[in-house]
Image: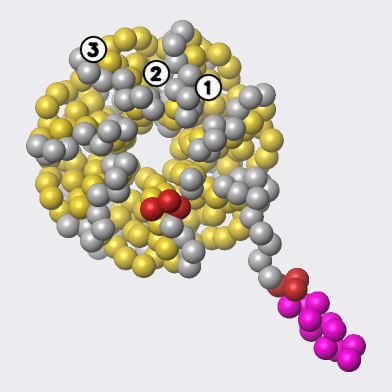
């Protein structure tokens, strides 16, 4: 009887703890894994191995699917590991791989979930892919060393940054063609679009700026310079209400908060070492930075601009995405 009670207790202890939610997914570039983090509880709940070097990451299908850009060390041609991996969020394992051109780095998905646009860094192209299924629809020439990708909220346009040509290519997704190229500051990395689709935000790592463009005209509206010489802006995200823009400052070891209307720096929040990827929870209450050198994720309370949790991830956290 005593043994049966002990076994019953052991079984209860082995049951997974309920999550406080939401869940964040972090791509760990150096150890080829995805960390699953319970944001509310500030704890690691799972680690998912992936067959390649993971960087860009998105959550789709209402949180049921995680898409991850994988690449390998082969330059200027599609290698065996270059793909978009499809992860079943419930099973926490890779269930499919979609061809996505050579060296896919970052990507975005249209709001209806039907198209994926990936930046092919070493090829200087952007791949347009049908979802589900992964059928290649177009390969478009963009700038040199493309990296950041963002799709407009209406799904009509995609924006692709290019680090070496210092440009942002604007893609008409219906026509599947590049319709404009915007000149930006030195080494643009990431791009984000405001929730109303009117503004486009681009970080420049070497230029040390966040530039705002009018999405309709392509004209530059403003540029915010980060005075800290160590700040190297990389990841960018916009609050759900569009009032604030959040920037991971890389070597600056902070998350910068920018007033979207006043176009001025409001705060610099110290986080882990070398924050690259950044994300906002759907309710706007938490910010998360993937810190590539300290190998952790900082969880920030947006209202107080304070770090309220730090969670160890894998080696080289790069990208981060939050489930709805």
Asked if one can make out residue 229 in the rendered structure from this viewpoint, the answer is no
Q: Residue 178: x and y, percent?
A: 12, 31
Q: Which residue is mark 1?
A: 256
Name the magenta segment's main secondary structure: helix
Q: Are marks 3 and 1 in contact (CB under 8 Å)?
A: no
Q: Secondary structure at mark 3?
A: loop
How many residues crowd around disc 1 within 10 Å: few (fewer than 14), some, or many (20 or more)? many
Residue matched to label 2? 210
Which residue carries the number 3 mark? 219
Q: Position of residue 106 (x, y in %)?
A: 32, 42
Q: Nearer the viewer, mark 3 or mark 1?
A: 3
Q: Is residue 264 visible?
A: yes
The CA distance from mark 3 to mark 1 is: 24 Å
For mark 2, give the secondary structure.
strand
Residue depicted at 32% across the width and 25% down the height: 197
Residue 3 shown in magenta: yes
**Magenta residues?**
1-11
Earlier sequence position, callout 3 versus callout 1: 3
* Residue situated in front as seen by the camera: 212 or 82: 212
Q: Percent x, y for residue 208? A: 41, 18
The dot on residue 212 is: none
Q: CA distance from mark 1 to mark 2?
A: 10 Å
């Amino acid at each position: 009887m005593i043994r049966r009670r002990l076994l019953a207790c052991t079984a209860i202890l082995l049951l997974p703890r309920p999550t406080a939610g939401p869940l964040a997914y972090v791509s760990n570039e150096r150890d080829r894994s995805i960390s699953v983090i319970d944001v509310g509880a500030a704890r690691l709940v799972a680690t998912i191995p992936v067959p390649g070097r993971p960087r860009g990451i998105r959550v789709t299908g209402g949180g049921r699917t995680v898409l991850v850009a994988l690449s390998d060390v082969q330059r200027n041609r599609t290698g065996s590991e270059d793909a978009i991996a499809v992860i079943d969020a419930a099973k926490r394992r890779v269930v499919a791989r979609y061809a996505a051109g050579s060296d896919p780095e970052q990507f975005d998905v249209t709001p209806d979930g039907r198209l994926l646009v990936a930046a092919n860094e070493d090829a200087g192209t952007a791949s347009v892919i049908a979802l589900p299924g992964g059928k290649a629809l177009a390969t478009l020439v963009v700038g040199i060393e493309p990296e950041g990708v963002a799709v407009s909220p209406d799904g009509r346009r995609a924006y692709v940054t290019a680090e070496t040509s210092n440009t942002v290519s604007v893609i008409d997704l219906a026509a599947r063609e590049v319709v404009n190229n915007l000149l930006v500051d030195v080494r643009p990395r990431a791009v984000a679009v405001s929730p109303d689709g009117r503004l486009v935000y681009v970080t420049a790592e070497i230029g040390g700026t966040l530039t705002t463009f009018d999405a309709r005209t392509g004209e530059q509206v403003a540029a915010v310079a980060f005075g800290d010489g160590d700040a190297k802006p990389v990841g960018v995200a916009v609050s759900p209400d569009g009032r604030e823009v959040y920037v991971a400052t890389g070597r600056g070891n902070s998350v910068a908060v920018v007033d979207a209307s006043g176009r001025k720096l409001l705060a610099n929040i110290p986080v882990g070492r070398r924050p690259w990827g950044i994300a906002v929870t759907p309710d706007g209450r938490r910010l998360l930075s993937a810190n590539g050198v300290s190998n952790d994720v900082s969880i920030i309370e947006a209202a107080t601009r304070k770090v309220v949790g730090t969670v160890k991830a894998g080696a080289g956290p790069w990208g981060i995405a939050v489930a709805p």
